[in-house]
Image: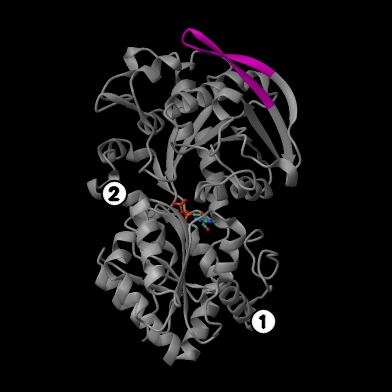
Amino acid sequence: MKVLFVASECTPFIKTGGLADVIGSLPKYLQGLGNVDVRVIMPKYSDINFSLTGYPQWQKSIEISMEWRKQFCGIETLEYNNITFYFIDNQYYFNRPGLYGYYDDGERFAYFSKAVVDLLPHLQFKPDIIHCHDWHSAMVPVLIDKRRNDDFYKDIKTIYTIHNLKFQGIFPKEVLYLMELDDSYFTFDKLEYYNNINFMKGGIIYSHCVTTVSPTYVEEIKNPFYGEGLEEVLKYHQYKLKGILNGLDYEEYNPSTDSNLYVKYSLKSLQGKTRNKKMLQKELGLVEDKNIPLIAVISRLTEQKGFYLIKEVLDEILQMHIQMVVLGVGDKEFEEMFKGAENRYPNKLRVLLKFDEGLARKIYGASDLFLMPSLFEPCGLSQLIALRYGSLPLVRETGGLKDTVIPYNQFTGEGNGFSFTNYNAHDMLYTLKWAVDIYYNDKVQWRSLVKRAMESDYSWEKSAQEYLKLYGEIKG
Ligand code: ADP
């Protein structure tokens, strides 16, 4: 079986969030199951640093017709970790700093989607299944469907995975014409969305199967609170909707081999974790004390991740006998909130407003608690990394957080972290105080929580099997 992943980001090439982790690891695990050739196609952004992976090789160039224009499309390939990657080269669209947030994002990803579909006959790899991810590639199933009378395209099946329903790709109607789609697509039951077009809506309607990244989220998004305006579309198409939990790349994220850490460690050598803590404290100018609980936040600083809850009780958190490290970039409001608090509590809080993978690993390795009180969370990989590194996640019970963090139960001794149910700052604070209390007063229990966290198994094996089964079903 041949499967082509279409995505806008992928580790180790370029990453802004969990999507990149998934695209960088799922193909490897699928391929490990045998009988499936998975390849990945993505834009060749100028920010990708190929020095560590090797440089892609030029294959050929074609022209992509976009309404009255022709756009250049270079196809380059790279074998990395036994996976073939195709990069789409177009300097005009992708030779810019960063990935998203440009005035012409609609045009850029319309181009990307059209290029993927147009170049298929030139690849010498005809996929049975095209697996698209998030809004950036959501128009691919639409464009494939449009060609269903063409012999080359007619048997190709499409899967669309929603990694985050919040980002849908909503653009003016004119973007349709760039993809050579006509006004017949601009209707309520197709791409029209409040007088604009909605890429994600197209992906949901036109693909053969829609998945999202956790079993809880797949239920949540059928309700208005989580549905982001697409709940009716999702309900209408629920017969083809399925939730498959994301896994974590356990080879990549492994504290016993991770060279980003100050000291590697495992369950059997947890003193290594303590040394990481002391070295991070030293590097960040915090008091070097292994006995103070270190709370970590590594996140996009946006409302989704629960920062309004943190905002409400940040002073109360910082008045506890704790230390806190925040690594993230995002909304000015939250950046300033943390920077302000750092000024008020210079001995307790360090705020690092940047995206830094190496530092993130050090913080996962050094911290005792990982705070992630999301408003909504399709799956979340950060809590999985935290578990793997023995930093106990404290989460709100939503989406994938609910599916992966088992709350500590003092009566049965079960659990691998802490959680609270309502989107309420004081529920979060209460749970945090309880966790800190256990940290100080019940070392034995804390240790066994860390053990259970590190032994939790959220590797890709099981979920990759589920995807493979699904591919088999839709291929027919
Ligand atoms: P999302 O994709 O919604 O941002 P996830 O929890 O699924 O959230 O994935 C976030 C990923 O990005 C994790 O691997 C996390 O460690 C990483 N990450 C988030 N912010 C930063 C940052 N500032 N520096 C380094 N890594 C980060």
**Residue 297: x and y, percent?**
45, 65
Is residue 366 shown above or below 30?
Answer: below
**Residue 81 in sight in this render:** no
The extreme top residue here reads 68
**Residue 331: x and y, percent?**
38, 50
Q: How many marks?
A: 2
Is residue 321 shown above or below 74?
Answer: below
Q: Amino acid at mark 1?
A: Ser
Label 1 and label 2: CA atoms lie apart by 42 Å
Residue 440 tag number? none
**Residue 178: x and y, percent?**
44, 16
Quickly name the residue at label 2: 226
Residue toward you, 144 or 286: 286
The extreme front residue here reads 343
Q: Secondary structure at mark 1?
A: helix
Name which of mark 1 and mark 2 comes first in the sequence: 2
Magenta segment = 61-75
The quarter of the picture where the N terminus appears is: top right
Name the main secondary structure of what is drawn in magenta: strand
Q: How is the image coloured?
A: one colour
Residue toward you, 328 or 270: 328
Is residue 392 shown above or below 118?
Answer: below
